[in-house]
Amino acid sequence: MSGWDEGAVYYSNQAQFTEASSEAEGGAAASGTASRHSILLKFKEFIRNFEKEKNVFPYRESLVNNPKFLVVHLEDLLSFDSDLPSLLRSSPSDYLPLFETAAAEVLASLKMKVAGDSGEMVEPQTGEVQILLTSKEDPVSMRSLGAQYISKLVKISGITIAASRVKAKATYVQLICKNCKSPRTVPCRPGLGGAIVPRSCDHVPQPGEEACPIDPWIVVPDRSKYVDQQTLKLQENPEDVPTGELPRNMLLSVDRHLVQTIVPGTRLTIMGIYSIFQAANSSTNHKGAVAVRQPYIRVVGMEETNEASSRGPATFTQEEVEEFKKFASSQDTYQAICSKIAPSIFGHDDVKKAVACLLFGGARKNLPDGVRLRGDINVLLLGDPSTAKSQFLKFVEKTAPIAVYTSGKGSSAAGLTASVIRDSSSREFYLEGGAMVLADGGVVCIDEFDKMRPEDRVAIHEAMEQQTISIAKAGITTVLNSRTSVLAAANPPSGRYDDLKSAQDNIDLQTTILSRFDLIFIVKDIRMYDQDKIIASHIIKVHASAETASIDSRPTKEENWLKRYLQYCRTECHPRLSEAACAKLQSDYVDIRRGMRQQANETGEAAAIPITVRQLEAIIRLSEALAKMKLSHVATEGDVAEALRLFKVSTMDAARSGINQQINITPDMANDIKQAENQIKRRLGIGNRISERRLIDDLTRMGMNESMVRRAILIMHQRGEVEYQRERHIIVRKI
């Protein structure tokens, strides 16, 4: 006799369910004798009586504090009643409106009565309550969504690449008959579905009255009910795309309180109803394909993914945390981490240490006046071909939690920052984020940095220092976040690093972009017999053991451990400098500036890489990254000393590199060079032009050393006294 007093016979709720959803009632009824009314009562009981702890009612309190929407965990619903989550998963479009009705009724019962216009106590007016679902289950792949998921609850993750403008979507459409003027209200299907307008009017004509024709209804927009709606485009996470495939994207529809909460570039995990709709322009593309529909997801729950937790869960087990803390407390933490950075590459120890600092990053700071200081470290590797620069980039792309790899020649300014695209169906403009936006919270690896067009390189200036991308195109004015580290690899203009040239000629990049890199490494291919022998032996070993490494699963476990440790350090640790470290850093920075000023006075020209306040901030970030590796919340003097050493072997060496540093000129050599200069000035007048080869031959016939003549020409070229023209001809400008 169970259920005899539930009032199911008298209960009617047509307004909640559209005609489309009523067809699925047979399946719902078959799952048990539970009627809609009994399920409504269960939902109300869950919101009222679910206890997290003793005498703690989270959903009831949440509803009173925020009557607009209610976030429900499916795990809580499962522990309260095992049938309710399965009903929501199998036919969410039927039971979610019922859940929202239950929430609105509970809210009305929880509110106190208020005094009406006449002074009597009346029930308070409560609006609709939006139910947002969330779950701890793993998201499914976007590629695995097929026909079997239609009208089911699914959970997927990805990165938002576009967001449309907010539109008003009708929930109830008010119709009026153009013949008899009788009104009618028709419910609209949620999401991208429309309303089903009846073909005929129900009005019974009186004798002598004209009958209503077919399709007599006129829509009255002013009396219809609306909610806000927005469409988003969700793309697969870059790390989940199979090699050689294009990333898939999915259309999302969000409404009410979820609109205007997401900007392009945000990583999301969403729960929604996998639905279908008839695209506006599909009839032209698929003639005769009446039953073909486009899939989309109607979002019923949304959470932003943490920047450090895109791959793998953000939660760490107690055993993992203990293991990480034990590793961080050991003496050789720094060396152990550096040994895990690109183990297949021989040597380049300082580059590996710099890459480790880049992966861990410094601490991001927000100042009281609203200014944000970046914590991400940018590194440039400049040097000869075949020095494993691209291998470092590939390793970082694989190891960093969020990473985007791009090549300089194949990248445009819009592809790196953001592009404005016109939607083919609605003809509206919308933003689509580029590589710097997609890698928000991670690393952008740019190979062949020197091959980029200068105007494209300028586009990433703002992203590298301010960590934002400002857009003012086609009526869209906005600012996107791009909190990324940049790891770039470049070759000198002549292909190889030339010691006979100055630093300015070897580093053919603008000062504005160079000052934004915290560390600049000159990577040279030095020909030394012993070192070549060791490198050859190492490479042969790597190739010989490659087959066994692919069978053995240990390296992947090692990579995964490093990735997890990276995530843990980035989320848990935000170090600051100690007092002693600050004092040491201040005095050392002043000394570096003094040394650079002295060098500029001696040589008569400014350094190729300027030492500015940005470089001081770079040393601070490096010190914080070194402290973060050891899970220390204070950066000590030792961290500052190592950061300064890294800075000196990279950026400082690069600033001093070139002819002035590399060639130690003896007094005799200086005398020979001076004589060669005098002979050149004697032979050529101002404006005269001569082939370089002929000039060298003439002077060597006079008994001069050829290399001294070449150096004399090079020094005169640096001073601007001579200049090269076509076919290596020399023209004298001033003497």
Image (tube, grey):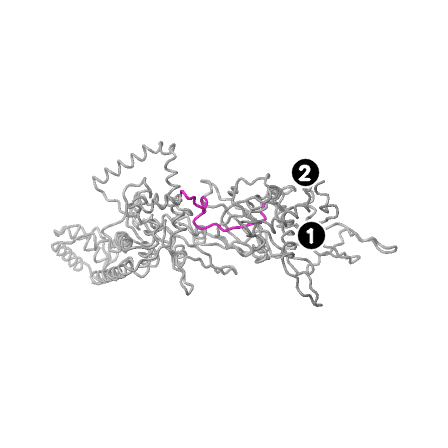
Residue at the bottom extreme of this rendering: 118
Q: Based on the displayed image, in which of its 4 quarters is residue 82 positioned? A: top right
Look at mark 1 in the image and give the residue it sits on: 187
Res. 299 visible in picture = no
Q: Is residue 82 above or below residue 256?
A: above
Q: For the magenta stretch, what is the residue range?
A: 295-319
Of the image marks 1 and 2, the number of the one nearer the N terminus: 2
Q: Nearer the viewer, residue 429 or 564?
A: 564
Task: Please tell me whether residue 512 belongs to the stretch shown in magenta.
Answer: no
Q: Nearer the viewer, residue 424 or 66?
A: 66
Q: Is residue 182 left or right of residue 71?
A: right
* Quadrant that contains the C terminus: bottom left
Q: Based on the displayed image, in which of its 4 quarters is residue 374 positioned? A: bottom left
* Quadrant that contains the N terminus: top right
Amino acid marked by disc 2:
Ala
Q: Is residue 212 left or right of residue 157?
A: right
Q: Could you tell me which secondary element the residue under label 2 belongs to?
A: helix
Look at mark 2 in the image and give the residue it sits on: 30
